[in-house]
């Protein structure tokens, strides 16, 4: 929560000329309700089942249509049992947008509709609980700065195919 997944993901997708997909948006479309309302009515276990199904569906669509996409996962998605392994088997590079807990907390204090954000103490506990999962990500980027700088750092990782300016084809450069 509050790491900048949507803001940075949107800018990254724009830079790559890829599609941006927010898993939270897919979940809301599939359930026909806001995530906070879904949590209230059905609870977190039901939400996590829907989340996992939408993650698989989003990756399936991207692979099936051969349409590259930047996918923003929910704050708890990667912390769910089996999610890191699933994404690894799908050869999906995962980038942890890391910020200090103070930065995340300051950002979340101004947001509404966060079903797992109750107060500072529970937020810090949830953050500490999720850190071991986040550390399994393939890459870690400091997202506590200007989003444009974060996107530049991500692009410098060299993990995305380059676009040939003379065509609409993606050209994969070999990794060193």
Image (cartoon, rainbow, N blue to C red):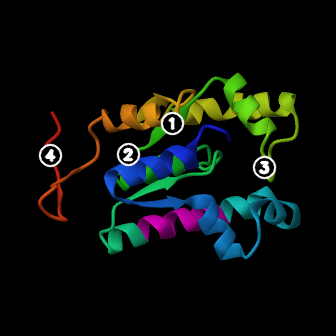
> Can residue 85 be seen in this snapshot?
no
Which label's residue is closer to the chain start, 1 or 2? 2
Query: How far apart are the two marked residues, 3 and 4, measured between alpha carbons?
Result: 40 Å
Q: Which residues are magenta?
A: 50-60
Relative side of 138 to 1, left or right: left
Which label's residue is closer to the chain start, 3 or 1? 3
Q: Is residue 56 magenta?
A: yes
Residue 128 lies in what quarter of the image? top right
Secondary structure at numbered mark 1: helix
Disc number at residue 93? 2
**Residue placed under numbered mark 1 in the picture:** 147
Residue 47 lies in what quarter of the image? bottom right
Indicate which label's residue lies in the foreground, 1 or 4. 1
Secondary structure at numbered mark 2: loop
Secondary structure at numbered mark 4: loop
Which label's residue is closer to the chain start, 2 or 3? 2
Query: How far apart are the two marked residues, 1 and 4, measured between alpha carbons?
Result: 26 Å
**Residue placed under numbered mark 4 in the picture:** 173
**Residue placed under numbered mark 3 in the picture:** 114
Query: How far apart are the two marked residues, 2 and 4, measured between alpha carbons?
Result: 16 Å
Q: Residue at x 36, y 59 (%)?
A: 18
């Amino acid at each position: 929560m509050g790491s900048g997944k949507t803001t940075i993901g949107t800018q990254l997708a724009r830079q790559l000329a890829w599609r941006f997909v927010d898993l939270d948006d897919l979940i809301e479309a599939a359930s026909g309700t806001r995530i906070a309302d879904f949590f209230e009515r059905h609870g977190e276990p039901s939400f996590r089942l829907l989340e996992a199904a939408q993650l698989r569906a989003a990756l399936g669509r991207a692979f099936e249509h051969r349409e590259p996409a930047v996918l923003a996962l929910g704050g708890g998605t990667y912390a769910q049992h089996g999610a890191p392994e699933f994404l690894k088997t799908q050869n999906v590079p995962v980038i942890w947008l890391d910020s200090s807990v103070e930065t995340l907390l300051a950002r979340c204090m101004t947001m509404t509709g966060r079903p797992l954000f109750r107060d500072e103490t529970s937020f810090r506990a949830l953050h500490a609980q999720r850190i071991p999962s986040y550390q399994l990500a393939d890459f870690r980027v400091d997202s506590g700065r200007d989003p444009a700088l974060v996107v530049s750092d991500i692009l410098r990782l060299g993990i995305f195919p380059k676009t040939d300016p003379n065509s609409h084809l993606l050209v994969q450069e070999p990794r060193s």
